Amino acid sequence: MLEILQQEIVACCKCPRLCSHTAEVAQLKRRAYRDQTYWGRPVPSFGDPHARVLILGLAPGAHGSNRTGRMFTGDRSGDILYKVLHKTGFASQPVALSREDGMELHDLYITAAAHCAPPGNKPTPDELRNCRPYFERELDLLPDLKVVVALGKIAFDVYLDVLKSRRDIASRAPYLFGHDVEYRMPGLPTLIASYHPSQQNTSTGKLTEKMLTDVFRHAKKRAAR
């Protein structure tokens, strides 16, 4: 069922602005990648169907995942993320270059709040709502899930919105975003918030490799319980 869902995601055309933008970026390309064929479509999720840990990111990068067709692959965010995931035992290798590079995830599944690369890396509220049913179905299709790691506040808010709409929580008010902040909810996966590994955060030192490593060691520990 997860495989069928990913096929639906790749074929999705719910957001005209995003469909137009991803196609335009794929046609114009960045000079450094002009000899490459861009993916230029919604990017499917990636990972272990028996995962106990799920990463919820924001959206594909225009010249990263929108180019390579795999989550967090081919840009600076992925450079630090996969290095950390390899170090903590979730990824088979520390570098992610393309869909054909042999990368495998262990006990980990990666998805996003929006599956298309948005202009300015900012999906609109309507675009996030259009994509949310895919994420909700993924939650239902990952029966072993014990931990959700939300990368960035938007992903954090999207997950809480899902829980509130399902009446799993009464209000979002008690849940404040912060780095490596944990929330345990009876009968639900543990929620761990993290700063997003964007180039802006890593280049300014707001998020370091050690800080991100600590998050995934934390997630691994919680998943083992």
Image (tube, grey):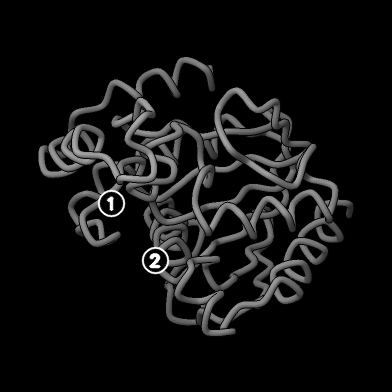
Residue 159 vs residue 54, the one in the foreground: 54
Indicate the position of residue 170 as horizontal and vertical percent values. 45, 68
Q: Residues within 10 Å of mark 1 (few under 14, many from 20)?
A: many
Residue identifier under label 1: 128
Which residue type carries mark 2? Ile
Indicate the position of residue 62 as horizontal and vertical percent values. 32, 48
* Residue contact at pointers 2 and 1, CB within 8 angstroms: yes
Residue identifier under label 2: 154
Which residue type carries mark 1? Leu
Write down the quadrant of residue 171 in the picture.
Answer: bottom left
Answer above or below: position of 183 versus 86: below
Write down the quadrant of residue 161 in the picture.
Answer: bottom left
Q: Which element type, helix, strand or loop, lies under badge 1?
A: helix
**Which image quadrant: the C terminus?**
bottom right
Which residue is at a point 88% across and 51% down the rendered structure image? Answer: 224
Indicate the position of residue 140 as horizontal and vertical percent values. 54, 34
